[in-house]
Image: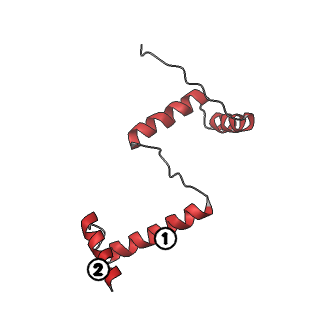
Amino acid sequence: MTETSLIQARVDTQLKNDASDLFDSLGLDMTTAIKIFLKKCLQEGGIPFEIKNTDSKDMNAYKAFMMLRKQAEDNGLSDMSLNEINDEITAARKK
């Protein structure tokens, strides 16, 4: 038999009850649901869903970054080295 370890986490009661109700409706208990989550994390090599920062300042910066990244890809510049990027910045500042 495989050795097991205990995982403990504190969550608010309503979250626990809502999650338990959901898992019950899927025919799962909390332990099985957590095991599925952990196995999926290992399979994906990370959290198996996108995690976003909802702070508006951070989101605006993220959106601006993604827009610039898309423009770079559209213009064939997405694979520039850091030195090439710095050279472009230096040239733009001289103008």
Q: Nearer the viewer, residue 88 or 95?
A: 95
Q: Residue 50 shows which numbered tag?
A: none
Residue plotted at (50% across, 19% down): 5
Eyeballing the image, is 39 above or below 62?
Answer: above
Residue 32 picture location, percent across and down:
55, 29
Q: Secondary structure at mark 1?
A: helix
Eyeballing the image, is 30 above or below 18?
Answer: above
Give the residue pinned by disc 1.
Answer: 64
Give the residue pinned by disc 2.
Answer: 91
Q: Is residue 23 left or right of residue 65?
A: right
Residue plotted at (52% across, 66% down): 61
| Quadrant where the image shows the N terminus | top left
Q: Secondary structure at mark 2?
A: helix
Residue 76 seen in this snapshot: no
Residue 43 picture location, percent across and down:
39, 39
**Quarter-of-image position of residue 78:** bottom left
Q: Give the residue at the far right of this rendering.
A: 14
Q: Amino acid at mark 1?
A: Ala
The answer for how far apart the CA atoms under marks 2 and 1 are is 22 Å
Q: How is the image coloured?
A: secondary structure
Q: Is residue 32 left or right of residue 21?
A: left
Q: Is residue 33 left or right of residue 39?
A: right
Residue plotted at (39% across, 69% down): 69
Residue 71 picture location, percent across and down:
38, 75
